[in-house]
Image (spheres, rainbow, N blue to C red):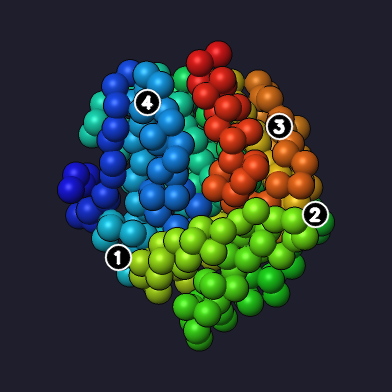
Amino acid sequence: MPFVTTRDDTEIFYKDWGTGQPVVFSHGWPLNADAWDPQVRLMAGNGFRAVAHDRRGHGRSGQTWGGNDLDTYADDLAQLIETLDLRDVILVGHSTGGGEVTRYVGRHGGGRVAKAVLLGAIPPLMLRTDANPEGLPREAFDAIREGVATDRSQFYQDLSEVFYGANREGHQVSRGTRDAFWLWSMQVGIAGAYDCVEAFSETDLTEDLRRFDFPTLIAHGDDDQIVPIVAAGEKSSRIVKDNTFKVYPGAPHGLSMAPPFKDAFDADLLAFARG
């Protein structure tokens, strides 16, 4: 399996399919690159080079005790892009992966970037503060940490329900999709899973978003129960200069894997990449 070794000797797994303009996918917490497989296959089958990696601590990448923060995630992404010498890149990030993409631009600039897609992404800030009243209270993130630390297997099974909107009447989410979520989640090292909660909830990415100087698709479901649209997509769309804000009515957080929203997002992703 292909790996990139980072500056602190952490091995980062990646898959690299197809040829053409590179599209680099960053996954959400607590998943891995396999969560992007339908879109990686889609892009590779339509004339793009699709690259997706497992974030450190997740999937097949190294389970480090330290470095489970957005600065290091962004530096790992930079290492992958530079090692593969990718240019004119379309960055695609879901949830925490959207934060990783955003912090990458903030720390490393957009010199290698052509476009970006932020799907259900955490920027600018998830935590409720006096300056960010639309965010979620700290108690919500404390509950996530408690779930990870005590009975993470059951916690991940329960989380899959709201992640895909399976608690909504008329949902079309299969048991298999929820089981895959659990499987990917259980591959995350507990240290990385726990520390990442602080990373995705408390990192302010406002200034990083201001550095976006390329076309950006900001996509969000308006029934996202994990990353509420009012605190994330809506606010990001008011910060990023050159953006298209796409709202999917009734769509959950994991809309890229949940029918019927998946097909709509796939079409929008491909059209944006080609446009």
Three-letter code, disc 2: Glu
Three-letter code, disc 1: Gln
Residue 2, numbered label: none
CA distance for labels 3 and 4: 24 Å
- Could you tell me if the residues under marks 4 and 1 are in contact, i.e. CB atoms within 8 Å? no
Mark 3 neighbour density, 10 Å: few (under 14) some (14–19) many (20 or more): some
Label 1 SS: loop
CA distance for labels 4 and 1: 32 Å
What residue is pinned by disc 3? 246
Label 2 SS: loop
Mark earlier in primary sequence (2, 3): 2
Give the quarter of the image for residue 155: bottom right
**Figure disc tally:** 4
Residue drawn at 63 percent across, 33 percent down: 264
Give the quarter of the image for residue 197: bottom right
What residue is pinned by disc 2? 134
Three-letter code, disc 3: Lys
What residue is pinned by disc 4? 45
Mark 4 neighbour density, 10 Å: few (under 14) some (14–19) many (20 or more): some
**Res 66 seen here:** no
CA distance for labels 1 and 2: 33 Å
From the viewer's side, name the closer residue of 133 and 160. Answer: 160
Nearer mark to the viewer, of 4 and 1: 4
Residue drawn at 71 percent across, 47 percent down: 251
What residue is pinned by disc 1? 63
